[in-house]
């Protein structure tokens, strides 16, 4: 099992990310931390294989934690999971050896792809021995996870992105009719893409019960939970 430490200043977000990790075969959450000091303490205590590291912490930054980990000679791997979009932060993360950088908000399939690519890299490296150039290329290629799952035949990436952006920008849940009105697509098209995004874990379905008749299906962007 790959032991993972989840670091995020938001307790609820850390819980959600930990639940995501536990859904990926071969991964187990070794602990959760909500500040830099706690992250360093748990790194010493549980010796995780991988840290999902937030950047904005109440007593420092994730990159400061990574620098201290390296100073203490911890070989723990790091995937940055943060809302920090500054290119300087991304560059600093690369220089300090972060293997991946996942920008919030993200979908469950995207995190799963990052973890699966990391597991693939671990399997390749654990084989040991000497590496030819083709092996080195394979090691680095294992870090390249697809940004989004491939859409089924007959679905447009542009329309899927339009529906995603609509839900991301909404203050709450939306019905297929409301998504259709906001995006300009037909209700049937909106419904089809909403069902697709629900199946891939990018949106969550809720039911609103009225006085009579069938409950209304409403959809909310998954990272809001």
Image (tube, grey):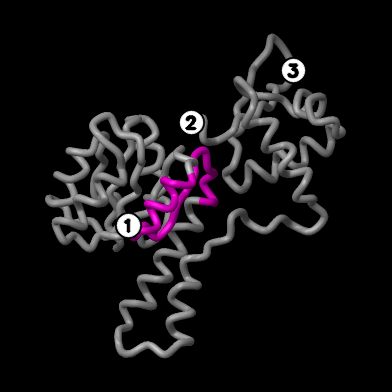
> Disc 2 marks which residue?
225
Please tell me whether residue 35 is drawn above or below residue 29 in the rendered image.
Answer: above
Residue 26, disc:
none
> How busy is the neighbourhood of tag 2: few (under 14 within 10 Å), some, or many (20 plus)?
few
Q: CA gap, disc 3 to disc 1? A: 57 Å
The residue drawn where x is 59% and y is 42% is: 202
The image quarter containing residue 205 is: top right
User: Which residue position holds label 3?
Assistant: 213
The answer to the question of whether label 2 and label 3 lie on touching residues, with beta carbons closer than 8 A, is: no
Q: Which residue is mark 1?
A: 96
The image position of residue 36, as x and y in percent, is 23, 38
At numbered mark 1, what does the secondary structure look like: helix, strand or loop?
loop
Query: Mark 2 or mark 3, which has the lower sequence index?
Result: 3
Distance (Cα) linking label 2 and label 3? 28 Å
Q: Earlier in the sequence, mark 1 or mark 2?
A: 1
Residue positioned most to the front: 88
Element carrying mark 2: loop
Q: Which residues are magenta?
A: 87-110
Residue 204 vertical position relative to residue 145 in the rendered view, above or below: above
**Tag in front: 3 or 1:** 1
Q: Position of residue 25 (x, y in %)?
A: 40, 60
Q: Is residue 107 magenta?
A: yes
Which of discs 2 and 3 lies nearer the camera? The answer is 2
Query: Is residue 2 toward the left or the right of residue 163 in the image?
Result: left
């Amino acid at each position: 099992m790959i032991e993972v430490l989840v670091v995020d200043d938001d307790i609820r977000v850390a819980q959600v990310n930990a639940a995501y990790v536990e859904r990926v075969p071969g991964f187990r959450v070794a602990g959760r931390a909500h500040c830099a000091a706690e992250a360093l303490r748990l790194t010493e205590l549980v010796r995780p294989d991988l840290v999902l590291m937030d950047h904005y912490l109440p007593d420092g930054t994730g990159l400061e934690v990574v620098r201290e980990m390296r100073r203490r000679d911890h070989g723990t791997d790091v995937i940055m999971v943060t809302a920090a979009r500054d290119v300087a932060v991304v560059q600093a993360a690369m220089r300090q050896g972060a293997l991946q950088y996942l920008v919030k908000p993200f979908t469950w399939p995207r995190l799963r792809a990052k973890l699966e690519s990391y597991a693939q890299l671990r399997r390749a490296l654990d084989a040991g021995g000497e590496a030819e150039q083709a092996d080195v290329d394979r090691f680095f290629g294992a870090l390249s996870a697809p940004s989004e799952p491939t859409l089924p035949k007959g679905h447009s990436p542009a329309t899927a992105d339009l529906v995603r952006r609509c839900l991301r920008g909404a203050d709450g849940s939306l019905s297929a009719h409301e998504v259709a009105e906001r995006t300009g697509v037909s209700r049937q098209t909106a419904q089809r893409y909403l069902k697709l995004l629900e199946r891939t874990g990018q949106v969550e379905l809720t039911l609103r019960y009225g006085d009579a008749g069938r409950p209304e299906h409403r959809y909310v962007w998954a990272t809001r939970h």
